[in-house]
Image: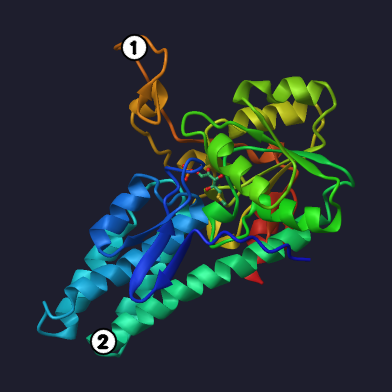
Amino acid sequence: MAFESKIRPITWENGKSKMIDQTIIPYEYKYIEITSGDDMFNAIRNMIVRGAPAIGIAGAQGIVLYAQEGRGKYNNIDEFKAYLLEKADYMATSRPTAVNLMWACEEQRKIIKNSCSDMQGLIKELTDKAIEIELDDINRCKLMGDFGAEVVPKGATILTHCNAGALATGGYGTALGVIRSAFAKDNTIQVFADETRPRQQGARLTTFELAMDGIPVTLITDGMCSYFMNKGMIDMVIVGADRIAANGDTANKIGTYTVAIAAKYHNIPFYVAAPLSTIDISIKTGAEIPIEERAKEEVTHINGERICALEGVNIINPGFDVTPNELIAGIITEKGILRPDYKKSIAEVFNK
Ligand code: MRU
């Protein structure tokens, strides 16, 4: 059963993209307009919009914005298409790890290559596709919610890492979508949210959107998860994903791997919730997933304020890690819950 979320992080309105600026939540909650392809590229790179499915939607919209800008600059449709294919490739590089972005840009590339329309007609086809990707994602999240809610025990306390919620998708969420659907059936469940350093998506975004929906949430810092698991206070873990390899190895926000190891040690089921667009069957294992390296200032600063870090200290800041498939109890998708052996269950779902 679906529990409606009021949050729509990115939509298409009157020929422009309208998105919630996620860099200022929870201090401010406001929409901004993105009106050019380059501004969309920067909004993705600077995480004004973030979360794997949401940046897929953003990428698809960004290509529409480039198409609108290019109209009138080209003498014929072939030149216009060549320009658009170049921009679609460029948009796909705005962030490297979440495969939904490349997937959505590829959907637009297919339209550009195969369309028989004139420039105006092609822009319409690209716009329709961007809207379809957004709305379709919400439906997929609700289906994941239905499947996932089945494995949430009555009165469970669920740990989550980062933000895999309405804010990270078209709306509703993947991991938080499962939690929303489970809460609609049993309002005694509750959530523990990891802070998620360095960008604090758990502290800033997950607590914000769960509180908005009245779902009980407790914020903990990243290092606390095994302490609460050891105390018997966590019943299951549900996280989202940025890219899943053909063998089930899963890239998600840095720190997820630590949570998965701690869950295994304490015999707590660790689930991943992700649409099929997050599964990259072109790569065999997680070792092939490109891991984004982000700015050092994300570690030394919070909201532009320096924290107590030694001036000039060496810093490395990978944005994601890869959880090996053997730590994952199930991958909750819009087609059902995939179980080990993932090489087999993933191949089966793609061949159906
Ligand atoms: O760097 P971010 O905030 O884009 O990372 C987001 C995550 O790691 C999410 O868990 C993932 O994208 C799944 S979102 C449904």
Q: Which residue lies under the disc numbered 1?
A: 313
The circle on residue 120 is 2
Can I make out residue 151 in this image? yes
Q: Give the x, y percent position of residue 247.
A: 61, 48
Amino acid on which the number 1 mark rests in the picture: Val
- Label 1, label 2: how far apart the Cα atoms are: 53 Å
Q: Give the x, y percent position of residue 229.
A: 78, 26
Comparing 346 with 292, the one in front is 292
Amino acid on which the number 2 mark rests in the picture: Gln
Can I make out residue 335 in this image? no
Comparing 287 with 204, the one in front is 204
* Residue 206 relative to residue 127: left or right: right
Local crowd size for mark 2, using a 10 Å CA cut-off: few (<14), some (14–19), many (≥20): few
Quadrant of the drawing holding the C terminus: bottom right
SS label for mark 2: helix
The correct choice, above or below, for 252 with respect to 223 in the image is below
The correct choice, above or below, for 233 with respect to 106 in the image is above
Q: Residue at x 46, y 43 (%)?
A: 288
